[in-house]
Each structure stands twice: as structure tokens, then as C-alpha cells.
Amino acid sequence: MAQETIASPDLKFVNDVIKGGGESLKKCYQCATCSVVCNLTPDSTPFPRKEMLYAQWGLKDKLFPNPDIWLCHQCSDCTAYCPRGAKPGEVLNAVRKMSIEHYSVPSFLGRAVGSRQYLVLLLAIPAAIFLIILASLGHLSNVPRTGGGQISYHEFLPSLYIDSVFVPVALFAVICLAIGVSRYWKDMVRASGLRPSQGGIANLISATIYEILSHKRFEKCNVTKERKISHFLVFYSFIGLAITTAWAVAYLYGPSIMKFLGLKPFSWMLGPSPYPLTDPLKWLANASALALLTGITLVVVYRYRNKEKSGLGGYYDWLFILVVYSIAATGILAELFRLADIAILAYPVYFIHLVVVFFLFAYAPFSKMAHMVYRATAMVFAKHIQREP
Amino acid sequence: MEKKYGVYICKGCGIAGAIDIEKLAKAAKSGAIKEENIKTHDIMCSPGGIQMVKDDMKGGVNTIIIAACSPRVKYEEFDFPGAVTERVNIREFVAWTQPPMTDETQSVAEDYVIMGIAKAQRAELPEPAVLENLSRDILVIGGGITGMTAALDAAKAGYKVILVEKELQLGGFANKLYKKIPTRDFKEPLIVDTEVEKIIKEVESNPNIKVYKSSKVEKTKGQPGLYEVTISTNGSSETVKIGAIVLAAGWIPYDASKLGYLGYGVSKNVVTNIEFEELAKKGKGKIFRPSDGKEAKKVAFIQCAGQRNPDYLPYCSSMCCATSLKQARYVRQNADALAMIFYIDIRTPGRLESFYREAQNDPGIMLTKADVTGVSDAGNGNLFVEMENSLLGEKAKVEADLVVLATGMVPATRAPQEYLDGLTQAATKGDDAKKAYIESTPKPEFILNLDYRQGPEIPSLEGAYGFADSNFICFQYETRRTGVYAAGCVRQPMNMTEAQEDAAGAAFKAIQCIDHVARGVAVHPRAWDLTFPDPQLIRCTACKRCTEECPFGAIEEDEKGIPTYMLSRCRRCGTCMGACPERIVSFKDYSVDIIGSMIKSVDVPEEEFRIIALVCENDAYPALDTLALHRKSIDPSIRFIPLRCLGGMNLVWIADAFSKGIDGFLLLGCKFGENYQCHFIKGSELANYRFSKVGETLDRLQLESERVTMMQVAIDEYHKLPEMINQFVERVKEIGHNPFKEF
């Protein structure tokens, strides 16, 4: 016998979904076309029909502790076929945003990242931090160059300062994400009535990672099939850039660490930047940067191309896209201006680059960036409860 | 009238390509029809062809046989007032369905022409039966929105109207409504005033309308044009002369006390949709719940409450979905309030779909499919709506502070019908049972109180659940009592806008009836027909079959059981003609003798098979025409003879046919049962009933009963006909020739 549930409609939540990009929510009349056309949903109690109803009734307790909102990859097949123009893809996207906001800690940051009016403030924080550092170094008026007279961002803002900002920021992000995701997991366990168990999770995690790396879910989409390419490019360029960063860390701190350990530094540990374009690190870095720029451009192109069928997306999506775009663009431009020796442009662009990178890292647990972790968690959980193979 | 014949054979539309016209003309020659009476034309329906006939009429021709296309087409061209005109269908039945220029095709054509001549020889020019002292006034029963609209429409058309309302004031249910759904635009405002007061004022100030309030129809005597209606008001009675009646007696809400499982009667805060209107009206839009007068902020609407459920109301009342959406708007006049609608399906037909969409867009109007299983107490006067199979949960409940049951409409005609059906049933068990029934059963209020042999109210119709619905989908407003036109919710569940349209329709039907009666023409569906049944009562045995079987209750009887025809109630179907064992009922152009002589005029060669098919002219005949249009072939052994209604089928024709040597006899009637199609209620069914007695006739003739069969065909089933017919023909051929052929 199924357990009796008491549903408590919540008008405020409905209005929040509508404001958060789910304007079309109320158009749904539960015909279930969406669940039928969806290639990603499991066959039993399929999404997104039930999510549409939960959202219409403001039943966040049913929406959030549920892996389904994340199993959706917003192919928009449902949106394209919806006879009422209810755009389930967009509604679920809005719900996902609210879910991140719901689980993320501290919650005020979640709300801030999600709303337009805080954008300036959120940007002002890193800008202020870096301006203070630069001012204290006196580099706002007088920028030192390398011995060879080249523009040097390391001289402009020494890595130690950057790292002393970014390491805590990254730690903060990781901790926040970890808290958010564990809240999510626990909530799903509670809602599904599962007794928490650790058995076999490792396998599920590796299976999930394989799925993510292979991007095979995107292949099931029809309306936005090409999204696999753009997402693939962005995803792997981020990995490339992550490797680049680790690599650069090795270059930068390698020699000192080796010395500290009483060892002779390897010859390839070049020390502080800039590095020559012939160096393999630069190959990877530049290739990743170009891939990121291409990928994120394609994201924008595809979004516009499919806007009739799948919708353009809301503030939350575009904030993330613009941040990634800015990172790629300012990164590449900073390098170009440096090589071209146009200091007047190079330093400001680099400054912006630092601000947006900060934005990406610091707010990752609250921005769309968090989808990576939440979706992966949902996928693992879905496997865990055998909702998915 | 001495008959002077003109036989005209058309060569157009492929006829001359399939039939040897010269030979056909020769075959037509016989007795009174001389060679000079037979003419051919390339295109009969052309002005030249028509002129040819008209010229002959000037020369004295008064009986015209046109062998051309189906009588269902070109009826305006082949209209020759003053002459008996018989159409012989050699285009559809021969040229288009038989192989060209074969001997068999030729004999089919010749048979049809000879059958047509046989009919024309016996048919007479009809003279309309015009009754005297006719009233042209219209009685409208019911002063709700339907009745008032009907009265106004009839009055505007220049007719005097008598409007009878049983309540103290006009307006009906519209009086109880807080607001209504706008008629035209569903954007803004979404709910508008009913403006019923305006309509009441208009009715009461109209000089052509006389309003009787707190009144009932005590008795309705007579027939269209000659009704004498007794109206009683507070004990005093008045009799008025009436031409036709609009029945707008409306509906009553389904008895919600039967819905205890939905909390009705258990909690004060469970109300019906009508009670909710009253709450809204009382609070001027604010909803204060009955138990404690607190403003209701979470209102649950349970759709189909006791509807679409065989245990309660089996049908959908069609207006409740839009009504609940409208009432949700009342709730949502308070921005914090929630309206929750639990439905099986939302049914908002037509433009109401836009109203649904608009309501749905309101975040505070929440809707879900659900099988509501019950309503239970949630404390403090609040209630839980319990449901299954909802996306809210397999078993879920939602708390509400007020529950509205979307209960349905029960037609005012239902109670009297049920009572009378019960009485009829009891009467079959004898006088004692009937007496016991009358004593034990409370008599509901009757509406029409017809002084008819067949009963005082509109008879119940299978599958109509007590609604005074038409017998056939095409004939809205037509009840089975000619002259009584049903409109509004007594006919079908509907909303106010639809009821107003209905009212106009029924008012015009009533006007049409008055007009036709004045001209002595039948009303729908034979709205051109001047003929009428003219029984030779001297031979009547008072068997009462005609009075019982008349689908429209048109025949009364005197104390000896001799029938009295109330001609303006008659729709000229000929059911009485088929019923009469003495064969005394005839029309000028339609009688047992006429059809019999058509059958007898079919040539029956010894070596050939011949089959007669009597076909319903409303369904089977058009289906045959359509089949011909598609150039499907028909077995050449069959001869089709149209009947006004298969209910007019007389068994003697079968006996006549077989004695003449016909090998098989086919009856093609319309569909009866659940998917009934009959234009005359149950003609096909009656034919089937009579047909069940055909065995005796065949046994007497020592013939196989399979030689006669009856089939049902709908107008759109032409594609099934060839196989149906061919199978029968094959069966007859298997049985072999009729042994009477040799005699």
C-alpha cells in the first residue's frame, strides 16, 4: 500500500519558479507528451510531467529531493513537442537553479548569484580585493616589467598574492559544494526512504564519471543534438585548463619545493611566468583556451538557433555563459596584448580576467557551475536506488 | 382526375452509355402509356429538358415519370406543381452500378421504369389538410434564461408568447449566480455580471409576452395549432389557445446528499457549485465559509462530483469545468487565496478553451488530475480532499478550508419520465400492481400534462437519461411530441450562452411548426410533404396497433378504440401504415397498394434470380447513392424500393413478392439500438419486430426463412453495402429459385 502523502501547495514557490525562468509553467495541462518524447527519462514515473505538476502546485519537497530534475539534460525535446507551449525544459532548468539555491550554503550567496540585482556587488568583491592588493603593491601606477622588459603578469600581481586569494576561495568553494551536495544526498535518501548504505557506491561513481566523460546522454537528445559538441568542448577545455594550472603550479613552485626537500629542481621547471610559446604547457594552455572560446561560442550559437524550440534561457544561464565567455576572451586577449606589448590594454584585461575567474571559482557552488556536481550526484543516486541502470 | 402520362428518359451522366435508351423507351410503352408519351432528352435537367416537360403539361400531361438521376438530387429542377411526379433512379441504380450495355443492365433499367410507372398510375396529387381556427401563439414553459430568451426571440419575430414560470419570479438559476463567464472575450474581465435582471425586465415589459408567474401547466390538449393549454396560478386556472410549445423547464442540481463520501451533509464546509455561487453572491465576491464565517482561502473544487459515474450521474454536465474555473476566479480575487481543482478531465469545449487557458495561467489556480476518493475532517472545520492516481501521490490528500462539489444537472423531465416508466412497468403486471405503484410512489410534478393516449409527458429515450432530447442528432429541439420543442438544460446539459442559442433555435422551430401547420405541410423531417395518412376507418378493427406504435403519439382513439388522427402531430412516416393488419392506412402517393404494385411489376424471368430490397430513404437510400457515386457495382438481381421509414413495412409485401416468384427479400434499415439513427424514432426496430413474424408467412408458403433478411446500415456505411448485399444474394442463389416462379 502506497504511503499517503499530504501535499501542501505553496503559491510563493510557484511564483518563484515563474520568476526564475519558468514563465510557461502554468501552461501545462498534464497531457504527458513531454514524458513520452523524453529519451532520457526512466520508464517508470517518468519526468518531466510530474515535475511540471509539482512545480505548478509549489511542491518543492517533492521536486528537490529527487534525482529526476538533474537526470534531465534539457534536450528540450519536451519543450519542442509540448502542445501547450509549457516548455518543461525551461521550467526544470528554473527548478534546478532553485534547487542549487536551496541546498547551497551559505544560502544568501545562493540567492545573490541567482538574482540580477546582486551582480555588481558580486563582481565588486574580487575587483576590490585585487585593487587593494595592487594598490598596496603600488602597481596601479607603476607596473614593473621582466628583466627582458616584457610585460609580465607575474610582476604585475605576483603569484603568491593570487594564490593566497584563490587557494582559500577554491577551498571555500569546495567546502560549500561538499556541504550542499551532501545536504542534497541526505535529502534524497530521506525522501526515497532508503537506509543510507555505502556499499557499491564507488562503482556507481566510476560509472557516472564514465558517462559524464563520454557525454553519451547528450546523444539521446533530438532537438539540441549539437549541444554535445559545445558542451564537450567547454567541458574538456576546462579539464585542459585545470591541467595547465597544475602544470604551472609545478613550474612555479616546483623549484622552491625541490630545493626545500634538498633536491635539485628539474630543468623543465621554468619558475615564474611568462613561459615561451614553444613550451608544451603553453600548447596545452592555448589549445584549451581556444577550445573554450569555440565551445562557449557554440553554446551561444546553438542557444540562439534553438530558441524557438527550446527557449533562450534565463539570467542564471546567461550569467554562467558570460562568465565563461569572459574568462576565455580575457585570457586569450591578455596573452595577445602581452605578446604585442600593449600594456595599456594588457593589464586591465588581465585584471578583468582575474575578477571573472574569481567569480567562477568563488560562486561555483551557487552558480550554474554547480550543475556539474549536483547532476553527477543525482546520477549516482539514481543508480543507487536503481532508478537508472 | 384523368391521368395523362409523360415518361421522360434522360441520356446524360452516362445513362445512354450504359442503357439502350430506345429499347428502354419501348419497354415503358404499355396500356395508358403510348409511344408519343415517351420522350428522351440528352440532359433532362437542362432548361431544354425542363421546358419539354412544361410544354407537355400545357398539353395536358399531369402524371410525370422522370427516369434520370436519384430523387435526392435535382429536386428543384424536377419540381412540377400540379402534376404527380415520380422519379426513377436509373443513373445511380443502373448506369453507375451496372456494367454497360448488357442484357441484365437493360432489364434492371426496364424494371425500374415500369415500377415507377406502376407507382405513378396509383399515386394521386396531394391536397394539404389545413385545419381551422389555428392559433399562432407560442407557449414557453420555464422562465429561466432559456425560456426568457425563447420568449423574447419569438416575440421579436412577431409572435405572441405566453411564458409560464413556476417560481415567484423569472430568472431561474441565473438569479443565483454571482457572475458569469463572458460570452465573447476571455481576456479581461474574466468574470462578468449575469445581467439577468436586464433580461427579466425586457421580458416583462414586452407587449407580446404574457408572463404567468407561480404557475404551472395543468393540461395540454389538442395538437399543434390547436392546443388548449390550461394554466393554473395559485389555485385559479385559465385555458389558452396555443400553436406550439417551447419546453424550457430546465434542470435541478443533482441531489448532493447522495454524495456523503465527498463530505456533503457531513461538513458544512462542503458545498455544491450552486451553493458556492450563493455564498459568493452573499459575500459580494468574498467567500465566507458556512461553518464559522471565516474567509475561505484554500478552496478545493472536486470536478465530476457524482458525475460520469454509473452509480450517480452517468453523464457529463459539460458546464461544471468552466463553472469551477470561473468560481476559482472568485476565490482568486483575494491574491493570497488558492483555488485547487481536482479533475478527471477538464472539458471546456469550443472557445471556453481560452477561458481555461487564462484561468490556468493564474499561479493561484492549481489543477490536477485525480480520482477523488473522499473528503475527511482535518480539524477546525478544514477538510482533507483524499485522492488516488494523482501525480501528487499514489494516495494523497490536500487540506482545504472549503470544498466545492461540481455537481451536475438533472433535467426537470427526468422525474416525471421515471415515474411514468415505472407506472408502465407496473401496469404490465396487472391492475393491482399498477394500483400499488400509484399508491406507493410519490408523484413528481408533471410539466406538460399532455392529454395524449401515449402519456402526459415526453416519453423517455434510451440513453438520454431523462433529457427531452431529440431522437436523432440532426434534429435539435425536436422532441417526440410534434409541436413541443425542447431548449436549454432540459434538452442537454449546457451553459448559459449555449442555452440562449438553444432558446433561439427552439423558438424558430416552434414558429416553423406553426407555419407548416397553417399550410398543411408536415414538419421535420418531411418538411415538404403535403400528403397525410387517410385511413379507411370503416374497415378498422380497433386493434390499436397504430395508436400504440405511432412514434409521435399522433393518434388518439375513441372509447371503442377507433383511431382519431391528430394530423398536425403526424410526421408522415407511415409507421401506422405498416402497423395496420387491415392495410387501411394510405397516403396519396404512398400506400400498401402502391408499394405492392411496384413489387408486382418487377419482371421475374424463370431462369433469373430476382430480389426485392425495401430501403429506408433516410439512410440506406443515400448510402446506395453514395455507393453509386463511387461506381461500386451492385448485383443485377436486386430491385430497390424506398420506404419513408422501414417502420412502414407491411408484411403483406413479402407474401406478395414470394407468390410472384421473387427469390429473396431484403430490408435495409437504419441503425437501431445504442447508435440509433432513425428519423422516426424506431422505424427500423419496429420493422425488425414485425419481421420476426415473417416466419409464419414463409412457413405458410413453404419457403426457406433465409430468403428474407433485414440489415442495418448507416448513411456513411456505403462502403459496406456491396459486401452486405452480395452476401445475401449469394445465399439466396445457394438456396435456389423460388418454386412459385413456375406458376
Image: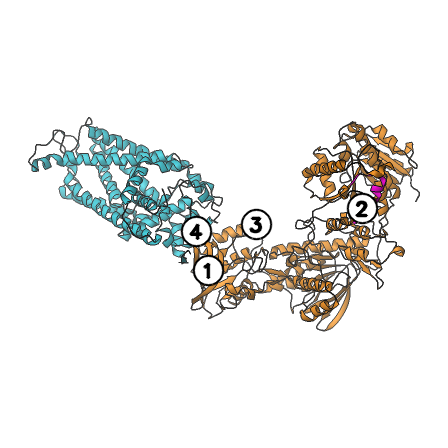
Chain colours: A cyan, B orange
Q: Determine which of the numbered discs, if any, sits on residue B386 in the image.
A: 1
In the rendered structure, the answer to whether residue A220 lies left or right of residue B571 reads: left
Q: Badges 3 and 1: C-beta atoms under 8 Å apart? A: no
Picture quadrant where residue B654 is located: top right
Observer-side mark, 3 or 1, equals: 1
What span is in magenta?
A: B648-664
Q: Determine which of the numbered discs, if any, sits on residue B699 in the image.
A: 2
Quadrant location, the N terminus of chain B: top right
Quadrant location, the C terminus of chain B: top right
In the rendered structure, the answer to whether residue A28 lies left or right of residue B608 reads: left
Determine if the magenta segment contains residue A284.
no
Distance between the Cα atoms at labels 2 and 4?
69 Å
Q: Determine which of the numbered discs, if any, sits on residue B74 in the image.
A: none
Camera-side residue: B299 or A190?
A: A190
Distance between the Cα atoms at labels 2 and 1?
65 Å
Camera-side residue: B606 or A388?
A: B606
Picture quadrant where residue B619 is located: top right
Camera-side residue: B316 or B337?
A: B316
Badge 3 density bin: few <14, some 14–19, many ≥20, Cα 10 Å:
few
Q: Magenta stretch mostly in which secondary structure? A: helix
In the rendered structure, the answer to whether residue B331 lies left or right of residue B162 reads: left
Distance between the Cα atoms at labels 2 and 3?
61 Å
Residue extending farthest left: A262
| Above-or-below relation of B1 to A57 | above
